[in-house]
Image: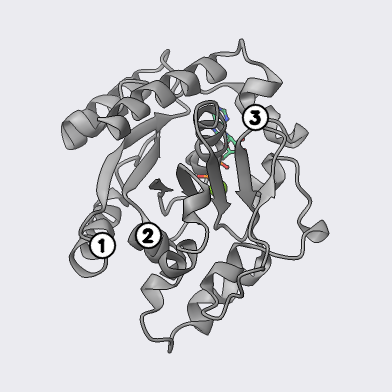
Amino acid sequence: MKIISIVNQKGGVGKTTTAINLSAHLAKSQKVLLIDLDSQGNATSGLGFIRSDINFSSFDFFQTNLDNNHQLYLKTNVAKLYLTPSSLDLVNLDLNLSYVDKREYLLKNSLMKIESNFDLIIFDCPPSLGLITINALTASNYVLIPVQAEYYALEGLTQLLQTIASVQNNFNADLDILGVILTMYDKRTTLAKDVKNEIKTFFDKKLFKTVIPRNIRLAEAPSHGLTIEQYDRWSRGAKAYRNLTKELMAIIDS
Ligand SMILES: Nc1ncnc2c1ncn2[C@@H]1O[C@H](COP(=O)(O)OP(=O)(O)O)[C@@H](O)[C@H]1O
Ligand SMILES: [Mg+2]
């Protein structure tokens, strides 16, 4: 069993799009649980669920007295892909847990109850480096960093790397950077190429060869509650996420 956190404290860089489509592809060969940790719930709605219909959420993982019969995930319309939806309660989590002992390990401890049911768990993290993201990183084997190909792409990455290093030193020595994936890439612009070169210099081998193009089909799919493979498998976005999945599996399996 492997656990991957998808992290970038910037919003709108493609974390959720990557979480949904990567999870769906990986579920072709294994049993995958996608855990929505963002109070905005885009991964939940993107897979076609309405939060008000569901009476449990990823917030429950942060409770210490979770009983064994508590439901923690749903079956999605993708075979072998399961989802833990998010809820608005997550907004106040940092504050509510500020006096709790070992609060960085709550998620990791709760996962022990269910991890034997899955081959892979993926966290879609919120746009912050607060306690929710720290919990995800503490529970993970890998962190995957989507970076949008735009001006100031590198801004914030130093802080993200510091947070990862701090989690490695204090809570989870096994945490590895899986790689950086460039998203919303427009190969016609010099800006996109410049950003790619800059990231390549900074991350070297950790930059995935696959880049995710800017593709309107990727932005449309979640409003239909569909993955890109279900919505338009011939699109460039679908092809890119297939390639990313192959590249990523080669690293995880090696
Ligand atoms: N490759 C892409 N091409 C076009 N639109 C994209 C692409 N990736 C994401 N989007 C859109 O950009 C917005 C932000 O993406 P999202 O995955 O929600 O980012 P994050 O989870 O980091 O906030 C969403 O509206 C999404 O549909
Ligand atoms: Mg998101």
In screen coordinates, is 103 left or right of 125?
A: left
Establish if 33 lies above or below 137.
above
**Residue 9 lies in quadrant:** bottom left
Q: Seen in the image, is 242 located left or right of residue 88?
A: left
Mark 2 vs mark 3, CA separation in Å: 26 Å
Q: Which amino acid does label 3 sit on?
A: Thr
At horizontal 50% and vertical 27% (from top left) the residue drawn is 29
User: Farthest right residue?
Assistant: 53
Q: In this view, does 101 lie above or below 209?
A: below
Q: Is mark 3 on a helix, strand or loop?
A: loop
Number of numbered tags placed on the structure image: 3
Q: In this view, does 171 lie to the left or right of 64?
A: left
Task: Kindly identify the amino acid type of the residue bearing the numbered disc 2.
Answer: Ala
Q: Distance between the residues labelled 1 and 2?
A: 7 Å
Do the CB atoms of the residues marked 1 and 2 lie less than 8 Å apart?
Answer: yes
Identify the element where label 2 is drawn.
helix
Q: Residue at x 45, y 24 (%)?
A: 212
Query: For mark 2, does the 10 Å Cα neighbourhood hold few (<14), some (14 to 19), or many (20 or more) residues?
Result: many
According to the picture, the residue beneath numbered tag 3 turns out to be 227
- Counting from the top left corner in percent of width and height, residue 244 is at 41, 24
